[in-house]
Image (cartoon, coloured by chain):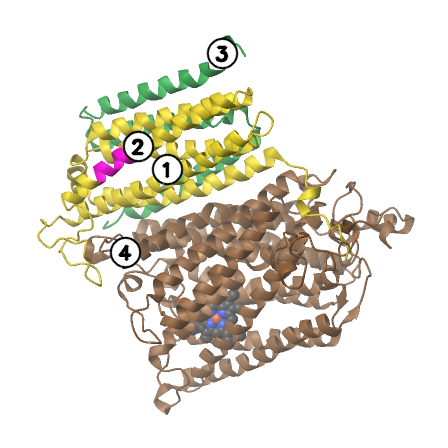
Chain colours: A yellow, B brown, C green
Amino acid sequence: MSEQALPIEAFHHHDEEGTRLGFWLFLFTELLLFGAFFIIYSVYRSSYLGDFKLAAESLNTTIGTVNTIILLSSSLTMVLSLDAIKRGASGLSKTFLLFTIALGTAFLVIKGFEWAAKFDHHLFLQTSNGIAAGKGSPLLNPGAEMLPPGQVLFFGLYFIMTGIHALHIIIGAVWMLIVYAWTARGSINKDNYGVLERCGLYWHLVDVIWIFLFPLYYLVA
Amino acid sequence: METAGSQSYLSTHTSSRWNRGLLSWFMSTDHKRIGIMYGFTMFSFFGLAVCLGLLIKLQKLFPGSSGWEIIPPEMYGATFTLHAVIMIFLFIIPGAPAVLGNFMLPLQIGAKDVAFPRVNLLSFWLYCFGAIMAVVGILLGAADTGWTFTPPYSINTRSISIFGGDFDSISWMLTAVFILGWGTILTGINFIVTIHRMRAKGMTLFRMPLFTWSIYAASWIQVLATPVVGISLIMIVLERVMPIGFFDPTKGGDPILFQHLFWIYSHPAVYVMILPSMGLVSEIIPTNSQKPIFGYKSIAIASCSIAGVGYLIWAHHMFTTGMSDTASIIFSFLTFFVAIPTAIKVFNWLATLYKASITLTPGMLFALGFIFNFSIGGLTGMFLGSLSTDIHLHDTDFIVAHFHYTMFGGAAFGLIGGIYHYFPKMFGKMYSMKWAKASFAFMFVGFNSLFIPMFVLGFYGMPRRYQTYPDMPIFNHFQMASTIGSWILGIGVVLLLTTWIRALLSGEKTSEMNPWNSSTLEWQTATPPTLYNFEEEVEITRHPYDYETFREEVKKGTSIGATNE
Amino acid sequence: MTTQEQSQSARTPIIVFSALIFLTITTVLLSGLDVGDTGAIIVAMSIATIKALLVLTFFMHLNHEPLIFKLFVALAFVTLLTLFLLTFSDYSFRGM
Ligand code: HEM
Ligand SMILES: [Cu+2]
């Protein structure tokens, strides 16, 4: 066995476009993952139209709109960050990245308050007949008013869909922190910004998903 | 110059830090090593699940009233679930792409590796992790939902823990399948990008070998369908641990919706299993007929259209669930369309064989076995795709026989044939022809005598997933015939695995580049391949199955690998 | 670099961003209108689709990508749409 066996990466020329193509394919999987949720939402909406509309009224449109604008703004700062690094302005790129993280965090904080309010109203994890599935759950408040099944489904979906969306925001924010560090270190720069670019693509996709979530939950009451 | 890249991949490791023993495999990003690791793990699981299958059949040797009991009733569900989960998720879904796709795809298109070698290794780790989780999950908790996890049973049932206490075996298994799903998604992404970005000079899309085409089509299914089932399985887990009800009818949910989402993936998944095997058959047949494959383009396009149409027909698994009649009619109608590209392939293979001088290598035998079995599987599928006959045959042994014909007689036979075909290239060792042919004979005869009786049993109303059956001559006789068939098949599988193991341990060494005289690119390089696959940049100048030009090239010594001889 | 250049390249994103905000406000305002259940969904989803297309094209730079990227994205969306349609071939006709 030869001593100076090269790592396989050594003979790989780096194919930026190929990597981007692969990343888009990954984004499709995210899209279809949420797609399954959208199918479930539409099916139950069509079967429980009245309940869904009633339940949607308890969501605050203003908060939803503000959050939409926050997320759209964060997409803008993301684009600007990438733009800056392409022009070699890594300081500016980092600033925009920080803005993006801040906006993402703001989104999460607002979402958190909204969730907390719903928890207080016992809208989470209720079952139509008040009996928890399987083992009794401490989350279930026995004194809460009973909701009809359609509304239970609505809130179940609301929490799961926005919850998984929020999870994506968190992942995106952590990724941006890493990108920030790498930019500061100089390993992301004018000639090598693929990571930032993919992080941006991810962030925009999360935005695209929210663009559809927003009207479905806040507007069609 | 002698560099690491020009030594056999078996002796050279790819990562200098992990260079000894098993770690040099387990940490390797070399597509060839990864393919072989998949092969070993998958076929170990296959052996295990075959034992369970034999056990299931042994249980059916005599009716329950005779006092015969191999598997107690309460364990029967767990047994077929373990059998099916292993066979489906750990063996046949990774299947040919994981073993031979990984190994051969870069070689077939003249690339040095797949597009993302480290992601490829990650896929394998995810596979291992998910596999361990699934098997531990079932073994500790005896989950008995079947591999389909149909709610509300999968939501409500509390599995029996083997060591007492509360062990949520079903949630474990669902999570495991989710993780396995990510492994195959990443493999799919990897292959698509590899095919688009890393083809050698002159390797146009319509100069790609057909196995590569079939992997391409299958990869798209993996990427676009797996997430749907992944999230549905996670929703079942959530329903199990939290009091919400997406699919539980007592809470307003619709269990049929789960079945939609499940089959949106799982129907196309049967094409993930079968397409690569069809691709392998399309490699084996022209090689052993020594002539160009008939209708190359139509086979390539048929692969893609099978993948496309495969998306539109999932609900043919649900005719008896109570979904709307309109949907049943639409899905039944669409189901018949998938027969068209499938039949095109079969006719093309037969046309290739016509008037050819055929060599019956073990690979070729399995390929022919594939065509035979798969035709039966496909044609009986038409019975099940028709609304009225499906009502009668649904959930009987008929369907069990049908899908074994497609998945075992089809997909697995194709994969096994492919491994026989590529074995000398992969390992530089030759197996015993006699043993290999014997393994085919036993497997082919055993397989058919196991499952043909099950068509009859199903037709006479033997339900699937039942531990026993009434003491009636029609059941007794056919069950016994089928069980005896399973023993012949068992011998075949033992022969198969020992043939391979013997060849690996003490097989005759060979460095012959192209033992079957194949015209495709993967054979035009050293045996076993070097770490970098090809010594020089290759340039493709002809069609992959252009045997005339190929023979001329060989005569003149201008074929691509000629310098290796 | 000059501020001139900077504002130049930032122009498209800012225009797109303004369009997105405009559409957001429009969809919120339109949701107050009484156009029936189906009407409301159609309006909301159409606007959302336009917004998503804007993000895909300009923020995710699909406009600068080779054709193959666009085809792939189209394939993914067409797949999703097909799944919707076929699922509703069941739910639109339940109990008939
Ligand atoms: C020696 C080989 C095999 C034998 C003897 C065998 C036997 C059986 C039998 C008897 C059943 C029906 C159980 C029942 O419904 O009561 C069954 C179910 C099943 N088998 Fe096999 N099988 C073998 C190989 C395979 C292979 C290679 C695959 C897939 C690649 C496979 C996949 C399945 C699946 C998915 C089920 C369905 C279980 C369920 O209903 O959930 N089997 N097998
Ligand atoms: Cu099917």
Q: Position of residue B487 (x, y in %)?
A: 55, 82
Residue behind label 4 places its C-beta within 8 angstroms of ligand 1? no
* Residue carrying label 2: A107
User: Which residues lie in the magenta part?
Assistant: A106-115
Q: Nearer the viewer, mark 3 or mark 4?
A: 3
Q: Is residue B335 visible?
A: yes
Q: Position of residue A123 (x, y in %)?
A: 17, 45
Q: Is residue A13 magenta?
A: no
Evaluate if marks 3 and 4 touch, with contact meaning CB atoms under 8 Å apart: no
Label 4: how many residues lie within 10 Å, few (<14), some (14-19) or many (20+)? many
Q: Position of residue B420 (x, y in %)?
A: 69, 65
Number of labelled discs? 4
To which chain does the residue with label 1 belong?
Answer: A
Q: Nearer the viewer, mark 4 or mark 2?
A: 2
Kind of residue sitting beneath label 2: Phe
For the point 17% across and 39% down, the residue is A117
Q: Nearer the viewer, mark 1 or mark 4?
A: 1
- Which quarter of the figure has residue B239? bottom left
The disc at residue B239 is 4
* Residue carrying label 3: C8
Label 2: how many residues lie within 10 Å, few (<14), some (14-19) or many (20+)? many
Q: Position of residue C74 (x, y in %)?
A: 48, 34
Evaluate if marks 1 and 2 touch, with contact meaning CB atoms under 8 Å apart: yes
Q: CA distance from mark 1 to mark 2?
A: 9 Å
For the point 63% across and 51% down, the residue is B29
Specify which label sits upstream in the sequence, 1 or 2.
Answer: 2
To which chain does the residue with label 3 belong?
Answer: C
* Residue carrying label 1: A169
